[in-house]
Amino acid sequence: MTKFTANAIRKMWLDFFRSKDHYELPSVSLIPVDDPSLLWINSGVATLKPYFDGRKTPPSPRLTNSQKSIRTNDIENVGYTARHHTLFEMLGNFSIGDYFKKEAIMYAWEFLIDKKWIGFDPAKLYVTIYKDDQEA
């Protein structure tokens, strides 16, 4: 299996979604602008609220980003395990009125199994869906 650096994965992600006509948004400040509901940015989609609530028009209905984020819901475990962090980058792809689950699932699958991108063996991947979801 190929080993990738964080920088390589980020670049592949953004390249992949740009190849699918997504507009790349830059990572923004961890301090939210015009959003009193958040103490800090905790996800890639948090920066897109103005597009979803109609305050702003997005530069494209298809967006992608690599957003620095902070989460503290399990802060007491930071330092005790290798998987608990407070700062991380969230890779995101978003559609504002353009596509939905079918296309999002196809994009995710292609990114994971295509040799041009991550190149996982599909026989070694397990896909799960919510039992009541009739669309996925």
Image (cartoon, rainbow, N blue to C red):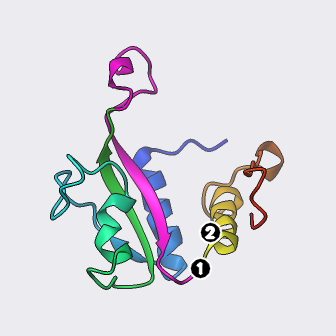
Q: Quadrant of the N terminus?
A: top right
**Identity of the amino acid at label 1?**
Tyr
At 49% from the left and 61% from the top, the residue drawn is: 12
State the residue at coordinates (68%, 55%): 119
Q: Looking at the picture, how far across and down is residue 51, in whole percent? A: 34, 76
Q: In this view of the protein, which residue sits in the foreground, 48 or 29?
A: 48
Q: CA distance from mark 1 to mark 2?
A: 7 Å
Question: In the rendered structure, which amino acid carries the disc numbered 2?
Answer: Ala
For residue 72, what is the image quadrant?
A: top left
Q: Nearer the viewer, residue 90 or 7?
A: 90
Q: How many marks?
A: 2
From this view, report whether residue 89 is shown above or below residue 87. Answer: below
105 relative position to 6: left or right: right
At label 2, counting other C-alpha atoms closer than 10 Å, the crowd grade (few under 14, some 14-19, many 20 or more) is some
Q: The residue tagged with tag 2: helix, strand or loop?
A: helix
Residue picked out by circle 2? 104
Left or right: where 58 falls relative to 28: right
Q: Of helix, strand and loop, which one carries label 1?
A: loop
Do the residues under discs 1 and 2 have CB atoms within 8 angstroms? Answer: yes
For disc 1, the marked residue is: 99
Q: Earlier in the sequence, mark 1 or mark 2?
A: 1
Q: Is residue 121 magenta?
A: no
* 125, above or below 12, in the image: above
Residue at x 33% of width, y 38% of height? 71
Q: Residue furthest right?
A: 123
- 10 Å crowding of disc 1: few (<14), some (14-19), many (20+): few
- Image coordinates of residue 46 in percent, x first then y, are 33, 59
Residue 97 lies in magenta, yes or no? yes
Up the image or down, 20 lies above or below 70; here it is below
Q: Which residues are magenta?
A: 73-99
